[in-house]
Image (cartoon, grey):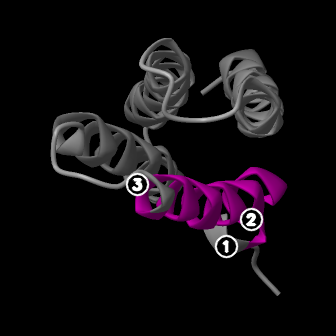
Amino acid sequence: MTKTFEDFSVYKKGLGLIKEINCLCCSVKGGQYNFLKDQIRRASASILLNLAEGAGKWNKKDKLNFYRMSQASANECFAAVDLFIAFQLINPAYAQTIKDKLRSIIIDLQALKMNIERRKK
């Protein structure tokens, strides 16, 4: 049976992260920070969407480009969590659990990219 992007552990971690991000955003009341909630939701979705699109590419360069964008989106989420902390919207301990999940995703994406880069074609 052929593996798909849905079988990637990083994809599964990303799905869990999106649920966590949604809970985070729902916990922040008031419209003043909607821009930040929208941004982190888009960035977290982008992690999975770029991973899935990259998995469907056959060309090494295209595949790597989408995996790089996925990793960049994870980095963006990491910075957004720091903004949630800076604006005193979430508990730093809670933020750390999200950052730990993001760090794991970033490491997995880096390993995935390195695996692709080692391929001859």
Magenta part of the chain: 7-26
| Mark 3 nearby-residue class (10 Å; few <14, some 14–19, many ≥20) | some
Q: Is residue 1 magenta?
A: no
For label 1, count other residues whose C-alpha is less than 10 Å away and answer few (under 14), some (14-19) or many (20+).
some
Residue at mark 1: 6
Examine the rendered structure and indicate whether residue 107 appears above or below residue 48. above
Residue 77 image point, x, y percent:
49, 30
88 sits to left or right of 93: left
Judge from the rendering whether residue 23 lies leftward or rightward of residue 14; answer left or right.
Answer: left
- Tag 1 near tag 2, CB within 8 Å: yes
Q: Residues within 10 Å of mark 2 (few under 14, many from 20)?
A: some
Query: Vertical placement of 82 versus 31: above or below?
Result: above
Q: Residue 12, which numbered label?
A: 2
Residue at 40%, 28% in the rendered image: 69
Q: Residue at x 34, y 55 (%)?
A: 29
At x 47%, y 27%, the residue is 84
Tell me the CA gap for discs 2 and 3: 13 Å
Q: Earlier in the sequence, mark 2 or mark 3?
A: 2
Q: Looking at the rendering, in which quadrant would you find the C terminus?
A: top right
Given residues 60 and 27, the one toward you in this image is 27
Q: How many marks?
A: 3
Name the mark on residue 45: 3
Q: Main secondary structure of the magenta part?
A: helix
Do residues under tags 1 and 3 come within 8 Å of each other at their CB atoms? no
For the question of whether residue 57 can be seen, the reply is no
Q: Nearer the viewer, mark 1 or mark 3?
A: 3
What amino acid is found at the position of numbered circle 2 in the picture? Answer: Lys
Residue 38 image offset from top left, x and y in percent? 24, 47
Q: Nearer the viewer, residue 96 or 5?
A: 96
